[in-house]
Image: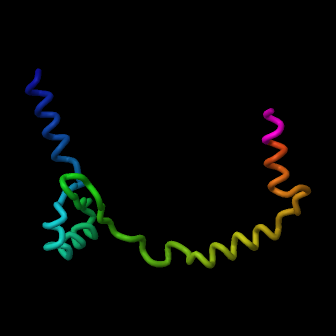
Amino acid sequence: MACVQDWIMVIFLKKMTIIMTDYPLAKAKEQLSRLIDKALAGEEVTITRHGKPVVDLRPRLASGQGRPMSALIDEIAARAKLLPPLKQSAAEVVRRMRDADR
C-alpha cells in the first residue's frame, strides 16, 4: 500500500505549477536581472540571508490599478463632509465609553 501512496504523491507533485526558488543573497546579487525575469514570469523568487528568507520578488500591480494617495485623501475628505456633525467630540465619546466600564 505504501507504493500506491508514493505514486499518488509523485503525481501530485508533478501537477503543482507554482515553482518556488530560494537564492542566497550573494548569488542573487550576481543574477538579479535573471531573478527579476523569473518573478515577472510568475515564479516565486525568495532571497535568503544566512539561510533565512528576507525578500520575496514578485511583479508590481499593473499601472492604473491603484489610485494616487492624494486622490484617496481627497475622496475621504469629500465623504467626511457629507456626514452629519457629531454631537460630541471624539474625546468625549471615548471618555464616556471608558467610564461606562467602571
Q: Quadrant of residue 100?
A: top right
Residue furthest toward the left? 3
- Which residues are the magenta region? 98-102
Q: Main secondary structure of the magenta part?
A: helix
Q: Position of residue 81 (x, y in %)?
A: 81, 70
Q: Quadrant of residue 29?
A: bottom left
Position of the N terminus by quadrant: top left
Q: How is the image coloured?
A: rainbow
Q: Nearer the viewer, residue 72 or 47?
A: 47
Q: Nearer the viewer, residue 102 or 44?
A: 102
Q: Position of residue 70 (x, y in %)?
A: 62, 78
Q: Position of residue 45 (x, y in %)?
A: 24, 61
Looking at the image, which residue is at 21% across and 55% down?
19
As for residue 100 lying within the magenta part, the answer is yes
Position of the C terminus by quadrant: top right
Looking at the image, which residue is at 77% across and 67% down?
80
Is residue 29 placed above or below 7 in the rendered structure?
below
Is residue 13 placed above or below 70 in the rendered structure?
above
Looking at the image, which residue is at 88% across and 63% down?
85
Q: Nearer the viewer, residue 60 or 27?
A: 27
Is residue 61 placed above or below 24 in the rendered structure?
below
